[in-house]
Image (spheres, grey):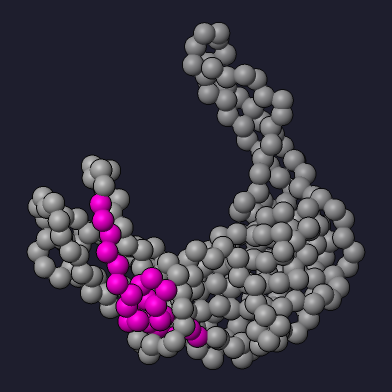
């Protein structure tokens, strides 16, 4: 655990007592399995970690959870774990083996498909950085009017929305480490009618490199925010109140005590974006 965000993880076990059976594509974990039964043994893992396209030099920085040691075999009643701090691999609070990169935004553009009220909307955010992003990087948009955005989804295969928290921050996990970076958002607006698009202050921040997997929230300092401020833009969405234009309900078998399938077909006045919800109420109790 704690290896998430690395572009490549190569693991091998010194000796024949254990074999590497599984490595995740994202570098989040490795699994080693015993080759035979042992009452006592010593396992040594030789890890080669690369961030992005090039391996970075070691720096003096502490991190917890970079390498998690321990046996998870339920058949073992008790075990003794011996750990030795290693400045190379960051075990037990040692030095971080990779350099933390603080990317800087060089240029960006922020466009929306339609600025009109009650129209479907699509946001396109394009930006370039001074360094390449590795897989697992995070993109955070702050000062977003989240109370008007109950849901959002990414239309780009290079990025994936993982959370929208109460602090108006969108968090993304990078799926591509090659520039240019283009993020497409489809916004599901609330039913609150808004005025014409206006300007609002938006700050964008990109975090790259390794980060502590045990840290759930990331709070940048004032100096970090100053590096990633972007110009103010127009409010990127307007309210859309979907209307049902046509609805048909049919069932396969209209007889009692037999299995039945109910089919609902609905046509909406506006396009329904990914992540939208359809509520049917009241609904009969089904056995």
User: Most prominent secondary structure in the magenta stretch?
Assistant: loop
Write the residue at 85% across / 70% down: 197
* Residue 81 within the segment the image draws in magenta: yes
The residue at 36%/68% (across/down) is: 67
Q: Is residue 64 left or right of residue 269?
A: left
Viewer-proximal residue, 32 or 182? 32
Residue 179 showing in the rendered view: yes
| Residue sitting nearer the eye, 195 or 38 | 38
Q: Position of residue 218 (x, y in %)?
A: 61, 70
Q: Is residue 273 above or below residue 93?
A: above
User: Where, by quadrant of the figure, is residue 182 drawn?
Assistant: bottom right
- Could one spot residue 188 in this view of the protein? no
177 vs 69, nearest the viewer: 69
Residue furthest out toward the right:
195
Q: From this view, report whether residue 100 is shown above or below residue 272.
A: below
Residue at 78% x, 65% y is 145
For this view, does 244 lie left or right of residue 100? right
**Residue 15: x, y in percent?**
11, 68
Which portion, as a residue range, is magenta?
A: 79-101
Residue at (55, 78) in percent of width and height: 207
Quadrant location of the N terminus in the rendered image: bottom left
């Amino acid at each position: 655990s704690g290896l998430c965000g690395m572009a490549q993880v190569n693991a091998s076990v010194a000796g024949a007592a254990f074999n590497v059976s599984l490595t995740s594509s994202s570098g989040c974990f490795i699994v080693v399995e015993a080759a035979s039964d042992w009452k006592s043994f010593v396992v040594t893992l030789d890890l080669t970690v690369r961030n992005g396209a090039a391996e970075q030099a070691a720096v003096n920085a502490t991190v917890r959870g970079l390498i998690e040691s321990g046996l998870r075999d339920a058949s073992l009643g008790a075990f003794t774990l011996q750990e030795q701090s290693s400045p190379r691999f960051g075990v037990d609070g040692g030095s971080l083996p990779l350099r933390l990169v603080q990317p800087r935004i060089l240029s960006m553009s922020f466009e929306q498909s339609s600025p009109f009220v009650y129209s479907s909307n699509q946001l396109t955010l394009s930006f370039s950085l001074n360094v390449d992003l590795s897989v697992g990087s995070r993109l955070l948009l702050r000062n977003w009017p989240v109370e008007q955005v109950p849901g959002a989804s990414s239309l780009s295969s290079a990025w994936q929305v993982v959370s929208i928290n109460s602090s108006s921050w969108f968090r993304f996990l990078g799926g591509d480490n090659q520039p240019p970076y283009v993020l497409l958002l489809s916004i599901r607006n609330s039913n609150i009618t808004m005025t014409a698009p206006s300007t609002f202050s938006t700050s964008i921040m990109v975090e790259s490199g390794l980060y502590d997997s045990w840290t759930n929230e990331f709070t940048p300092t004032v100096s970090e925010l100053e590096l990633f401020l972007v110009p103010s833009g127009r409010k990127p969405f307007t309210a859309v109140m979907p209307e049902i234009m046509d609805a048909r309900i049919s069932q396969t078998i209209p007889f009692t005590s037999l299995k039945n399938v109910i089919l609902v077909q609905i046509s909406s006045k506006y396009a329904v974006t990914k992540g939208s919800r359809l509520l049917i109420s009241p609904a009969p109790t089904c056995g």
